[in-house]
Image (tube, rainbow, N blue to C red):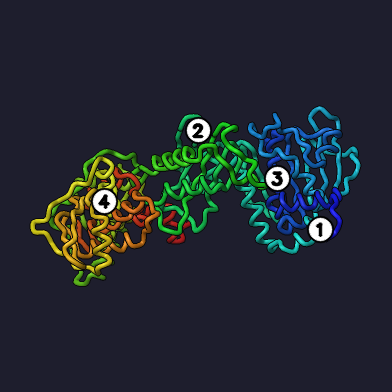
Amino acid sequence: MGVLRLLPENIVNRIAAGEVIERPAAAARELVENALDAGATRITVAIDGGGIDRMEIADDGCGMSADELALAVQRHATSKLVDEQLVQIETLGFRGEALPSIGAAARLSIISRTRDDDSAHAITVEGGVVGEVRPAAGAPGTVVVVQDLFFATPARRKFLKSARVESDAVEAAMSRLALAAPTVAFRFSRDGRTVFDLPRQTRAARVASLLGPETSLAVSGVRGDLRVEGFAATPSVNRATAAAQGLVVNGRPVTDPALRTAVRVAYRDVIAAGRHAVVALYLDIPPADVDVNVHPAKAELRFRDTDAVRALVIGALHRALATGAGSAAPAATPFMQFQSRPAMRLTSAPPSAAARGFAEAALALGNPSARMLPEPAAIAAVDHPLGAAVAQVLDTYIIAVAADGSLVLVDQHAAHERLTHETISSQMRQGGVRSQPMLLPQVVDLPESDAMRLAFHAADLADLGLDIEAFGPGAILVRALPAALGTPDPNPLLCDIADELADQDETTALDTRLDAVIARMACHGSIRAGRRLAGAEMDALLRQMEATPRAATCSHGRPTFLKLTKAEIEKLFGRR
């Protein structure tokens, strides 16, 4: 080993640069955070070659004087800390490392001017070598240009991804910052192409611009000094990754695992496994109750009371999702019981099932050769979000027309599955699920391991209205079933519940295990695909969907209905 010695300052700066700006996206984020802290109302970001070749960030913030400019490129020079305790951080940046780190690894030039100065000043830093401050031409604000990123640290540059991948990362970082600061106009371009150019907007407009107009469910919650607001998309609008989740804490965009876990838990019962919700959440918390000095990227936080934050987010999202299909307000109505009525028939029923399906589809498009008159109840339903039922296709899908002319397609099994699920869950929260004793108890034969598993959970299943007991090796005696299920065959029901319990280990929370069982029950107790419904039954299903929380998706996260507007239909037919 060599002699112990202090490293030269330029080497220290390059080591620090590797921690603070591990890729172009990090450098761009740090510079934009500086612009936001400077009070900018408009920020322009342009990158070339993934930000490796060049990036330019311009803002109209407070700017820097000549003396401040010389100090800004020195390590740990900052104007943002109000004390030395690191407990009252109210700015995005605070360490004073961004500019010197970038200057140590790239060719950096800064032009800045305060509103009180008659002219701007400029400074350059190349590979850690700082130039002199000199007069320059420039408007109030700051322009930062970074070229040849990591030319001074070739080892780091060698491990960068392709220019396209790095550009995508910069774009994602800029989108998160734009989402966090809707009152600031943002323009971002890559390789000469404008990606977005957003004016100063309301929070709702900014969310719609970046995450899509479907992200419109208002989210709000308060818990002591904690407050969360924002917007969420319905469960039917989801993504393959969590990239469309904007999480902002005290104005700082983060990818905090605790918050992402809270979002996942809130959507767990209404979204398919492996899919991710689309949300934009803005959390306000006293600065003293959160530590942002956890990681150089400042994307992960440490909360003083993580459980309170998690409960606040989950509760707020649950309330936002507790709306009926079609965004109707939830109503406390009794669970719908389908009436046994003759099925609606077409006036000219074709002989084959396939032909009947085509005829019913033609009916939905207004074909006069296959006409069915709606019942009076259906005519009165046009003011409802899901409209009036006009036909049933393939004895599985309900066709309805909304008041605005939109075409609504409903999967009757998926929809009724959610209604059954919510009914059982509601009864569970109110003290227990109502059960219906079987006229004659039935013995279900199962593999011995499944029978033992069900018998072990008999007490929990009793709370769900399922009364069972062991009946010798490999057998279960069923005495009662949940009343909401009707009279399903208990054999496949118990087989599925045993499979569900086998998928859950002992570390899984009890409420999670029970909810999974409820989902299995709901599937068995719902009207099946292939059952013909009368017009009144179809309309009753639509009305109950509008009044039932989370009815836009089934218990497995699949959509229960699709809605095609006039514009979408015209686009399908090439009319626009």
The amino acid at mark 4 is: Asp
Q: Classify mark 1: helix, strand or loop.
A: loop
How far apart are the two marked residues, 1 and 3, measured between alpha carbons? 19 Å
Instruction: Identify the residue at image location x=36%, y=51%.
Output: 512
Q: Classify mark 2: helix, strand or loop.
A: strand
For the view shown, which residue lies furthest in the bottom direction?
A: 352
Quickly name the residue at label 4: 460
Q: Classify mark 4: helix, strand or loop.
A: helix
The amino acid at mark 3 is: Glu
Q: Quadrant of residue 159?
A: bottom right
Q: Classify mark 3: helix, strand or loop.
A: helix
Mark 2 Cα-neighbour bin, 10 Å: few <14, some 14–19, many ≥20: some
Viewer-nearest of discs 2 and 3: 2
The amino acid at mark 2 is: Leu
How far apart are the two marked residues, 4 and 3, measured between alpha carbons? 52 Å
Query: On the picture, is 305 further left or further right than 394?
Result: right
Instruction: Identify the residue at image location x=50%, y=33%.
Output: 226
Using the rendered image of the protein, determine whether residue 552 is visible from the camera's viewpoint: no
- Residue 458 in percent (x, y) is at 23, 54
Of 376 and 139, the residue lying toward us: 139
Instruction: Identify the residue at image location x=41%, y=53%.
Output: 236
Mark 1 Cα-neighbour bin, 10 Å: few <14, some 14–19, many ≥20: some
Of the two numbered discs 1 and 3 on the same chain, state the one appearing first in sequence.
3
Quickly name the residue at label 3: 30
Quickly name the residue at label 1: 151
Quickly name the residue at label 2: 226
